[in-house]
Amino acid sequence: MSKIKKVDKPVISKNLDEFFTGMAKAFSFVKRFFKEVWFPPYEFKEVLRQCYEIGYRSLPLISLTGFIIGIVFTNQSRPSLAEFGATSWLPSLISIAVVRALGPLVTALIASGKVGSSIGAEIGSMNVTEQIDAMEVSAINPFKFLVITRTLAATFMIPILVMYTDFVALMGSFASVNANELVSLSTFFVQVFEAVSFLDIFSSVIKSVVFGFTIGIVGCYKGYNSSRGTEGVGQAANAAVVMSMFLIFVEELLIMQIVNAIRYA
Amino acid sequence: MLNEQEKVVEIRGLVKSFGENHVLRNVDLDLYKGENLVVLGKSGSGKSVLIKIMVGLLKQDKGTIKIFGIDNSNLNLKELNKLRLRIGFSFQASALYDSMTVRENLEFPLVRNVKNLTRKEIDFKVEELLESVALPNTINQMPSELSGGQKKRIGIARTLILNPEIMLYDEPTAGLDPVTCIEINNLINEVRERYKTSSIVITHDLTCAKQTGDRMAVLIKGHFTSVGTFEKVFEEATDKQVKSFYDYNFIR
Ligand SMILES: Nc1ncnc2c1ncn2[C@@H]1O[C@H](COP(=O)(O)OP(=O)(O)OP(=O)(O)O)[C@@H](O)[C@H]1O
Ligand SMILES: [Mg+2]
């Protein structure tokens, strides 16, 4: 049950009121996560199941998208570098672009479409059909069983998926570089690893952890608070995608600023 | 068999509104040990709200509910959960977990509330309950593969798995054909015999009411207008609304 009281009459205007009560509600939802995640019962089995679901659901689309992005980005960058006779820089350029920005962002956006929406729809329909209430009346904490497990699973899995996307995108890029510049796989990867720094990898991991958490918690929040009735389920799924994509871009921007500040300090 | 002395539930002056929608205005109700009490009322009269308040899914605005003598309004979550384990809540739409098989649905409340059960004990309990709702061979099916009546039965079995002393049935026969209705009614009566429960049965089906109820309580405009045996409440009804409820059910 939410502790935030509904006001009968609008204080400022109806929309603005709803915006602020919505913010407060979302904030207390996140707070509840951090309060409850440390204490038993731990639902390891459910977390594992969710990890599998998340990975399995996103893998085909991520593989395809990653590979194509690698090829396209390489092919689009080649003419500019060719002007300076610097096509040998392609592997370094691509690796920086992929590891710093494209990998995490593309993975997170795809996952918010695939994973976020399905979490939102699943929990939303459990809410509508009173399955969440059913847990509560049998003294089971639905927040622990549904929200914490899915959010943790997303937080673990997105970084893994990001590394996978990075790898696939680089393989796509290699396919193009190999065909055009006749660079061997080992030379390609030597250049790749020379170009990326520890800070790049570290910030990429941090970023993907944040993205994963966002996708999980937003999906759960929208599902958990879906309005009753079947259309509530669709709305929850949709809102989960929109909201998590928006937050992912904001977070990307913020983290990039922080990392650059560290990099050039 | 009615023990008039022992009340398991005592509701006094219960009030609940949602904004301008005053659902429960002043509800008094007693449930005696071992009885089946039928709550009747029109759609939207607040029957579900009433039993949801009893198990703490909703909070009343005013009034007290004592269950086994425990006032449920200022319990902490731990105490509330302890109380909830003694109450079985059968949902209007069954509320089976649709990502789990029937077996997992039944196990779920059991393994999370009773520690250190062996696999054998769990299986035994699950099979016993499926037997008692006459659906032993659905054990590995998903809820989506069950009919409405089967879902209701599995839902009832799931609530029985923790041996509740009070059963709350929210419209157990809604949306079912007359034959299945009678089967469910018999099940409700069997549950009382076998598990010695006291029950509140919510319905707007008078056949169900007559078959399962020791006493009737009619909820109209936010309070109980008449409470008593079926004959007293309906056949000797003077209140126009109660009477129309009766006529509507049998003239159809
Ligand atoms: N969580 C809620 N928030 C707002 N209003 C609610 C909520 N739950 C119930 N209501 C309102 O309370 C009223 C009574 O609802 P309730 O579900 O108790 O009816 P009911 O008697 O069970 O009807 P039915 O026979 O159709 O199940 C309805 O007007 C409903 O809109
Ligand atoms: Mg109802």
Image (cartoon, helix red, strand yellow):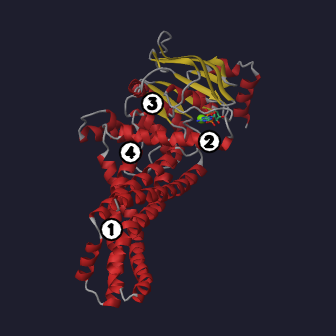
> Badges 2 and 4: C-beta atoms under 8 Å apart?
no
- Given residues B232 and A73, the one toward you in this image is A73
Residue named by callout 4: A148
The chain letter for the residue carrying disc 2 is A
- Marks 3/4: CA–CA distance: 26 Å
Task: Tell me if A41 is positioned left or right of B195 in this view.
Answer: left
Task: Name the residue at the top extreme.
Answer: B5
Whether A152 is drawn above or below B88: the answer is: below
Q: Secondary structure at mark 3?
A: strand
Q: Please say if B232 is above or below A220.
A: above
Q: Pick the residue in front: A78 or B227.
A: A78
The amino acid type found where label 1 is placed reads Tyr
SS at badge 2: helix
Q: Which is more N-terminal, label 1 or label 2?
A: 2
Q: Which chain hosts label 1?
A: A
In contact (CB < 8 Å): disc 2 and disc 3: no
Q: In which quadrant will I find the C terminus of chain A?
A: bottom left
Dot 2 corresponds to which residue? A18
Q: CA distance from mark 2 to mark 1?
A: 40 Å
Labels 3, 4: front one: 4
